[in-house]
Each structure stands twice: as structure tokens, then as C-alpha cells.
Amino acid sequence: MPSPNPRDRSPRSKRPSRPGPTGPLALGIDLGATKVVAVLIDAAGNVVRRGVRQPHRNDGASAVIAAVVHAAREFLRTGTDLPTSVGISVAAQVDPDRGWVLYAPNLRWREVPLGPRVARALKLPVRVTNDARAATYAEWLYGSGVGCSDLFCIQLGTGVGGSAVMGGQLAEGGNHAAGEVGHIVLVSGGRPCHCPDRGCFEAYVGGWAIAARARDAVRADPGAGRRLTAAAGSVAAIRAETVFRTARAGDRLARRIVAETDRYLGDGVVSVANAFNPRRLVLGGGLVNGRPEFVRVAQAAVRDRCQPPAAGARVVASRLGDLAPAIGAAALAARQ
Ligand SMILES: [Zn+2]
């Protein structure tokens, strides 16, 4: 694993003006459960070009890999700049040495040779990286983590991912999964998770879990859940975003669910900060776009509830936003 000094790669120090791309280009592809997003970066991390979200139907590995290859070809066909490497970020446990996805619950994949198949189709070297690790790498080199050698990034999206930079190194772990804090247990024997355990951080704060908690609350008290149901169209259609929107409009049940989510988020980030002792904790992922207040909530929890060595950690929002996983995957591929 390369470990460049982020201080040497500050976008501020390298980007006073941008006459053109710097060095070889890398294509980054973020593969999600429903979409593919492509981005082209240069050797200094500048986004040369970004593609539009290409939906896919999540109907099996072969079809999704075909959609990834199609999206990459279409994206490259619309420009003249060609990459020399490809990085793919995916919400999965991966084997980066072989480029295989070992387990991706949202894609329902096990043991899929994603990297080799895309490499063969595009005739380019491909590196596959877990999305939270890729996002952490991007934030460290080019985003909210620049200059910080002890950093933790939590991705709050459909699931909850995480990854750490400790002492200026991206923490690896025995199976490339260090920092997967979405499955620390907040509630012993609590709500079922998508992993084999119960009561996980993700099972309360992940987007799917916020939606599930809201649907349960509405079914338990349909009268109190009237506005949530109306906002979504049906109980089954309630999403985390519906909960945030309805809470902002003043609905009591939605506000209760958001307040509970804040408390669980606080529990999770306090545990993470105590365990890893980061100087900076970056919150990214789609849920932070839907509820930016999560950053303030997490900062207050760390300040008020952590033990003294951890309480000084600064909590910041992702600077690279939705593009962080694709940028990080591309940067890792370029340094392979
Ligand atoms: Zn879990």
C-alpha cells in the first residue's frame, strides 16, 4: 500500500492555477447498488471530468459488470483524455490483490472477479477498493483530511462504512477491512443487521435502518405516522430522506426518529473516537447531505462524552462529497 505524505499533496499548494491536467490520468468508478458513477482525475487529484449517474438494475454480477464496462466506455468516448489505470470502489469486502469482490450484501454478490473482468474488457489495469476505504484515501489526500496523519472517516449512506489513517498510513487489517465500524454493537441483541449480528451501529443509523425504524414506528401507530405515510406515498416507500424531510416540516413522530438517530450516531462516533483517537473525524455519505446537522451532533457527542484524549477530535463534513469513493479508487489505482 503506498503511503504518500498528504502534506506534499495539498490541493491548495498544487492548484494555484490549472493550465491542464497534471500527469497520467486515472478513471475512478463508484459502483453502488443501483448506479455507476465515473470520474477522471489527474495525478494531483484534480477532477478532469465527471460522468452522470448511470443506473443499473442490480440483476446479477454479469449484468452489473456489463453495465460498469458500458458506463466506462461511454464516459471515455465523450472525451479525448484517456486514463492509464482504473479504480473501482464498491460497498463490499474485497480482495484488492486479486481484484475480487468477496461479499457485497447490497449487490448480493459473493466471490465475483470484478477487477479481472473489467480489466479484460477495458484493456487497462484495474484496482478494486472498498468504498469507505477509497473515500478515506480521497479525503486524506485531497479533501477534508488533508494534512492530518490520524484521521477517521465514517460514511453514512445506505450502510455505515469506515476507515482509518493512523500515523500516516491507511490502516489495512488482516483482510483489508480495518475500520469497518458499521458493525460495532450499540445494543446487545438489538435490531437485526445485514451482517450476521444484531444491534450494530449500521442497524440504527444506516439509511436502510432509519427507514426500517420509521416503518416499524408507523405500523405501530398509524395515526401518528399519517404525515410520514403521506409524504412517502405508502408505508413501504418510507426512506431515510422522507424521515428527514417530514421532521423538518415539524412532524412529531419523524422528529422522534431523528432524535433517536442522533443519539445512536453519538454512541457510534464516541466509540470510534475513543477507540481510534483520531485528530479529525470526517463524516461523508448521502445521509450527511440529507441531514447536515449530523456533523454538529457528532461533534457535540465527541466533545461531551469522549474520554479526555479523544474529546479534542474535530468532526468535519466530507469536502469531496459523493465523488470521494471514485476519486479515492482512482488515486489508489494510479499508485498501484
Ligand atoms: Zn452488522
Image (spheres, rainbow, N blue to C red):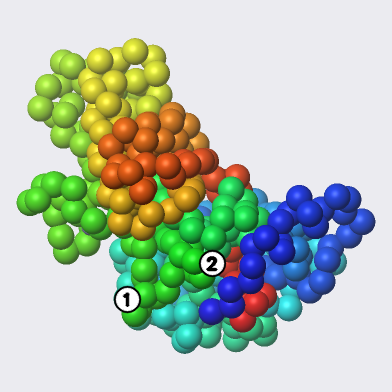
Q: In the picture, which quadrant includes the C terminus?
A: bottom right
Q: Is residue 1 visible?
A: yes
Residue appearing at x 38%, y 54% in the figure: 277
Residue type (three-letter) at the residue carrying disc 2: Gly
Q: Nearer the viewer, residue 100 or 305?
A: 305
Residue appearing at x 43%, y 31% in the figure: 296
Residue 19 falls in which quadrant of the image? bottom right
Query: In the image, is the residue at mark 2 within 8 Å of ligand 1 by its beta carbon?
Result: no
User: Which badge, 1 or 2, comes first in the chain's sequence?
Assistant: 1
Residue sticking out furthest to the left = 189
Q: How many marks?
A: 2
**Residue 76 position in % (x across, y down):** 74, 67
Q: Quadrant of ligand 1?
A: bottom left
In the image, residue 239 above or below residue 332: above
In the image, residue 2 above or below residue 250: below
Q: Nearer the viewer, residue 261 or 126?
A: 261
Instruction: Give the residue pinned by disc 1.
Output: 110
Query: In the image, which is nearer the foreground, mark 1 or mark 2?
Result: 2
Residue 195 tag number: none
Residue appearing at x 42%, y 42% in the figure: 312
Residue appearing at x 22%, y 62% in the figure: 195
SS label for mark 1? strand
Q: Nearer the viewer, residue 30 or 154?
A: 154
**Residue 31 position in % (x across, y down):** 50, 62
Asked whether, in this view, residue 70 is left or right of residue 274, the answer is right
In the image, residue 73 above or below residue 192: below
Q: Is residue 161 visible?
A: no
Q: Nearer the viewer, residue 204 or 263?
A: 263
Neighbour tally class for label 1: few under 14, some 14-19, many 20 plus, Cα within 10 Å: some
Instruction: Give the residue pinned by disc 2.
Output: 168
Asked whether, in this view, residue 231 is left or right of residue 85, the answer is left
